[in-house]
Image: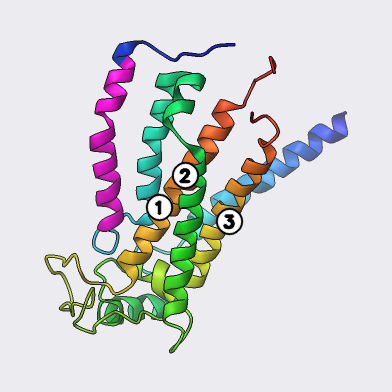
Amino acid sequence: MSDEGMSVIVKTVSCVLVVPTVVFGLYVIMHGHLTPGGGFPGGAVMATIVALFLVAYGKDGSRKILKKDCLSAAESIGLLLFAALAFAGISVTFFSNFLANTGNWFGTVIPFGPNPGYLVSGGVLPLMNIAVGIEVFAALSAIMILMFSYSGDDSK
Amino acid sequence: MCKVKAIKALTLLALLAMLVGTTVYMHDFGSPENAAMDDYFIQNGQAETGSNNIVAAVLFDYRGLDTIGEASVLFAAACAIFLLFRRSEE
């Protein structure tokens, strides 16, 4: 069974939508310590574009574009990064926020109460958000690709 | 047959009673019974973690061990699906 996906209009529009979707997902991930959001929702937002590609390009077309081995590696790297950041503060406790309030990198001391929001604050929180974002994006994309590509494949 | 229906109806009625009871006896919005933990996070969260978003501070700093469990669950689910669909590759 050959599945070449939908028309060229849908394919083009899905290519155009990559940019706003990925930018919004990255925004949600990187502002996780300032506004509602974070690694989990941001990764899910970025994974929606993979779902759109799967629908638009079909089983055969999407197999050439989306490489699930890279996603598998990214998933492992995200989780390892998260665990490494957790272990990096082991001199105090597991998951200690060793970067916060040091005044150095990501250690901006913020005033109490409402403030405009400083992107490089929060210690390890933004870094952990990025790690979790990579992991969630890769895991959700890999799950979708596998379940979409190999479901209902009776001809083999 | 009639007995099964009666049990089903009783179960639904008990669930309905629980839901109505919870709604009636729920404390007012914004006034929890034990607010010591919330007050601590609101007063010290910004100073201790440097993060404006208290939810993110709780998720990744105070309850970080919980979050790494969550991430591992997702990782394990993806691994299981990779294993399940492995045979149909090639």
Q: Provide the secondary structure element on which disc 2 rests.
A: helix
In terms of secondary structure, where does tag 1 sit? helix
Q: Chain of mark 3?
A: B
Please tell me the numbered disc located at residue A70: 2
Say whether mark 2 and mark 1 are on the same chain: yes
Q: Amino acid at mark 2?
A: Cys
Residues shaded magenta: A10-30
Above-or-below relation of A114 to A101: above
B59, above or below A92, in the image = above
Magenta span contains residue A15:
yes
- Which residue appears farthest toward the bottom when viewing the image? A92
Residue A104 horizontal side relative to residue A42, left or right: left
Q: Amino acid at mark 1?
A: Ile
Residue type of the residue flagged with mark 3 = Val
Magenta stretch holds residue A21: yes
The quadrant where residue B48 appears: bottom left
Give the Cα separation between the discs numbered 3 and 1: 15 Å
- The quadrant in which residue A81 appears is bottom left
Chain of the residue displaying label 1: A
Which residue is labeled 1 in the image?
Answer: A134
Looking at the image, residue A120 sits to the left or right of residue A148; the answer is: left
Position in image of residue A112 (x %, y %): 18, 78
